[in-house]
């Protein structure tokens, strides 16, 4: 049996549409189709989110990115590869994950700073793409020590690392 390239998606907004997933790897199509079903169709999304970001939200984002920048500098984290929009989003995601892991493992007393440096920060520094952080944002924090090691060793996390 062949995995289909075109999938019929029943969006959460109530619309239905056929989507060509031929550019997705075969093993990613079903998961992506399921993810799409939890979203609005493109037209409904545009209607809901087409307005420019409010000035208030823009200020909130600037404060978030400033905090993340401090964390990145202190932790020796490099810039991520991706569009400006992806970078802003992925940097916040990465900062939230790493801060959460610090609280979970170091602040709780389960591990020390040296462990955090070697098991968390070192592999995190090797993950250079926005895509990796965005794609893995929904995992629970305890999964990240293993995910970070896998990401540091994968092409997905290091697409543009020289």
Image (cartoon, rainbow, N blue to C red):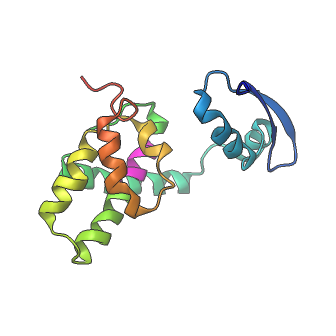
Q: Is residue 81 left or right of residue 19?
A: left
> Quick check: is 28 in the magenta stretch?
no
Q: Is residue 109 left or right of residue 98?
A: left
On the image, the x and y values in percent for residue 83 come to 45, 30
On the image, the x and y values in percent for residue 9 come to 80, 38
Q: State which region is magenta.
A: 88-95
**Quarter of the image holding residue 18?**
top right
Task: Decide whether the magenta segment is chiefly helix, strand or loop.
Answer: helix
- Image quadrant occupied by the N terminus: top right
Do we see residue 121 in this rendering? Answer: yes
**Residue at the location (86% across, 39% down)?**
16
**Residue at the location (54% across, 57% down)?**
56
Q: Is residue 158 above or below residue 112?
A: above
Do we see residue 87 in this rendering? Answer: no
Labels in figure, total = 0
**Quarter of the image holding residue 158?**
top left
- Image quadrant occupied by the C terminus: top left
On the image, the x and y values in percent for residue 6 come to 76, 26
Q: Is residue 139 above or below residue 136?
A: below
Q: Is residue 69 left or right of residue 35?
A: left
Work out which residue is located at the far front of the displayed protein and give it: 1
Q: Nearer the viewer, residue 53 or 126?
A: 126
**Residue at the location (20% across, 47% down)?**
122
Q: Nearer the viewer, residue 135 or 25?
A: 25
Q: Is residue 29 above or below residue 15?
A: above
On the image, the x and y values in percent for residue 19 come to 76, 29
**Residue at the location (36% across, 29% down)?**
155
């Amino acid at each position: 049996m062949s995995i289909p390239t075109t999938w019929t998606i029943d969006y959460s907004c109530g619309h239905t549409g056929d989507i060509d997933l031929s550019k997705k790897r075969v093993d990613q199509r079903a998961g992506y189709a399921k993810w799409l079903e939890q979203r609005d169709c493109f037209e409904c999304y545009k209607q809901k989110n087409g307005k420019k970001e409010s000035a208030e939200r823009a200020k909130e984002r600037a404060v978030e990115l400033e905090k993340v920048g401090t964390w990145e500098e202190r932790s020796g984290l490099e810039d991520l590869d991706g569009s400006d929009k992806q970078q802003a989003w992925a940097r916040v995601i990465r900062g939230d994950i790493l801060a959460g892991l610090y609280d979970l493992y170091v602040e709780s007393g389960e591990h020390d700073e040296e462990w955090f440096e070697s098991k968390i920060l070192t592999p995190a520094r090797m993950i250079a793409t926005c895509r990796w952080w965005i794609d893995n944002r929904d995992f629970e924090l305890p999964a990240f020590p293993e995910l970070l090691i896998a990401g540091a060793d994968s092409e997905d996390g290091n697409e543009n690392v020289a």
